[in-house]
Image: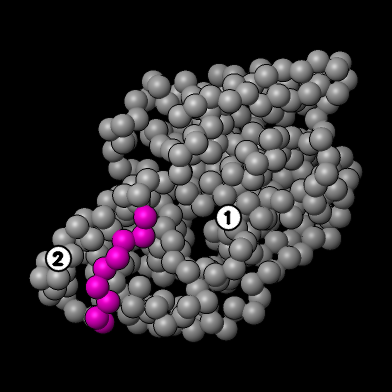
Amino acid sequence: MTNQNVVISDAKSGLTMAIAVAMSESNIYSAAMSKPLVAANGYFSRKKFIKKLETNGGGARINAFIDSMRASSPTSRASETEDQKSWIIHHPSALSVFEDIMNASKGKEIVVFLDYDGTLSPIVEDPELAFMTNEMRAAVRDVAKFFPTAIVSGRCRAKVYNFVKLSELYYAGSHGMDIQGPTKGHKKQRKGNQSVFCQPAREFLPMIDEVHKILLEKIKFIPGAKVENNKFCLSVHFRCVDEKIWSELWEQVREVIKDYPKLRLSQGRKVLEIRPAIKWDKGNALEFLLESLGYDKSNNVLPVYIGDDRTDEDAFKVLRKRGQGLGILVSKNPKETNASYSLQEPSEVMYFLKRLVEWKKSS
């Protein structure tokens, strides 16, 4: 990794302040994490599946697949090549350098983007029970009083709204493929267009529903596996699946998806994501919302994006490309990221949001 300096100008004083951030010049995910190639010959038992792979020299392939599945989960052990102390130097806690960040942001319009699972709520075994605390909800509500605030989640928009229950926010569900502005807001955040609505993958709805029904039948015999319909994408959760049968789950999902070339398969935190194969992700959602708010060509905006998932890297990349904004990764373990700063868990996210409000009130 190498360090680069991002300079944020102070429009009021004319001073500038360089914030050292870590920017990895390598790919975010190593070759060991690339999508593995496994045999696709329909459904068969795990023993037959493993035997067939070994017969065809597929041992390395299945190992690569398992490594990829492990690496996509923060519950796995930290990479041996990443030292915790070294990593935190390159990705300092956003709390420990909070005053420096805020001093450098004077004269900037802050816009807040938040992932949900693992950022505002803890990661839980049952995704239907990923509730945020009332204290966290109050912190987000207070932030939205002073800054335009958006929830950007892989969940369907309606579901994440039911978790958050704040109508003054922007919601980007299905990894940004379903965006809607707030139904009520505050005068301080009405810079651009609040009547925001964007569904770039609407034509895929019938296909997503069709695949959802097929997957429900395909994986119902795999203990612990769950299929979640997030409207414009599907999530196959394997958090409660025995690691010994991860390969079987992958094969069942891949066997279905191979008949739908307009869909693509990727991995998140112990979840397989099935999305339309269009150029649209959380990074595009961030850019769309900044444009809707009237900040797309502004040099006086400071987007702050906080997320924990592999899919949030698309947003971190956008901030890095723009040369403005703060990407904050929520993770206890060192891992490759395009984020500049880190927080360890949702409780630290809440404290960061509270400090942001306090700073705004005092300034």
* Badge 2 amino acid: Gly
The quadrant in which residue 276 appears is: bottom right
Report the disc number at residue 24: none
The percent position of residue 217, horizontal first and vertical second, equals 35, 82
Q: Residue at x 24, y 73 (%)?
A: 39
Image vertical order of residue 338 relative to residue 127, above or below: above
Image vertical order of residue 314 relative to residue 106, above or below: below
Q: Residues within 10 Å of mark 1 (few under 14, many from 20)?
A: many
Q: CA distance from mark 1 to mark 2?
A: 39 Å
The percent position of residue 15, horizontal first and vertical second, equals 81, 15
Quadrant of image for the N terminus: top left
Evaluate whether residue 266 shows in this view.
yes
What is the chief secondary structure element of the magenta stretch? Answer: loop
* Badge 1 amino acid: Ser
Q: Residues within 10 Å of mark 2 (few under 14, many from 20)?
A: few
Mark closer to the chain start, 1 or 2: 2
Location of mark 2 (residue): 57
Of residue 291 and residue 349, the one placed in the foreground of this image is 291
The percent position of residue 110, horizontal first and vertical second, equals 76, 35
Q: Residue at x 65, y 41 (%)?
A: 321
Q: Which residues are magenta?
A: 34-42
The quadrant in which residue 45 appears is: bottom left
Q: Is 39 included in the stretch rendered in magenta?
A: yes
